[in-house]
Amino acid sequence: MSFSAAVLLFPISYIFGDTWRIAAGSMVAFYGIWPDVQVAKIALAQYLLKTGGEVVTPPLTYRIAAFHIRV
């Protein structure tokens, strides 16, 4: 697999894998305790926060690492 293919496939794989992990975790943790609508809202909020964080943090990490390499 070429580097460009890996760069393209990693985010796609991560997003779909995270979707299933969060959905399964929310179902196991809260199903039967909370109403189904509330479980779905919690799963969606977890997904958006986790995936949003993963979108924001790599560029910041790269900039911090590049700064430390130069210093």
Image (cartoon, rainbow, N blue to C red):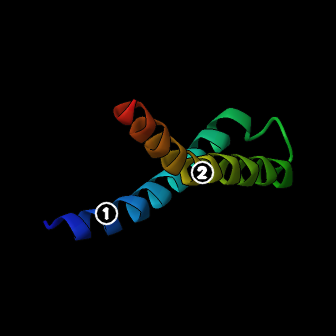
Q: Amino acid at mark 1?
A: Val
Q: Give the vertical position of 57 relative to 10 (above or below).
A: above
Sort mark 1 into few (<14), some (14-19) or many (20+) by Cα contacts within 10 Å: few
Q: Which of the 4 image quarters holds residue 1?
A: bottom left
Residue 17 spot, x, y in % from top left:
45, 54
In 3D space, how far apart are the residues under numbered discs 1 and 2 (Cα atoms)? 16 Å
Q: Give the vertical position of 65 relative to 48 (above or below).
A: above
Residue 3 spot, x, y in % from top left:
20, 64
- As helix, strand or loop, the secondary structure at mark 2 comes to helix
Q: Which of the 4 image quarters holds residue 8?
A: bottom left
Q: How many marks?
A: 2
Q: Which residue is mark 1?
A: 7
Label 1 close to label 2 by CB (< 8 Å): no
Give left or right: position of 3 versus 17.
left
Residue 40 spot, x, y in % from top left:
76, 54
x 67%, y 33%: residue: 29
x 42%, y 65%: residue: 12
Give left or right: position of 31 versus 28.
right
Q: Amino acid at mark 2?
A: Val
Q: Nearer the viewer, residue 34 or 58?
A: 58
Residue 56's disc number: 2
Q: Nearer the viewer, residue 48 or 29?
A: 48
x 34%, y 33%: residue: 69
Sort mark 2 into few (<14), some (14-19) or many (20+) by Cα contacts within 10 Å: few
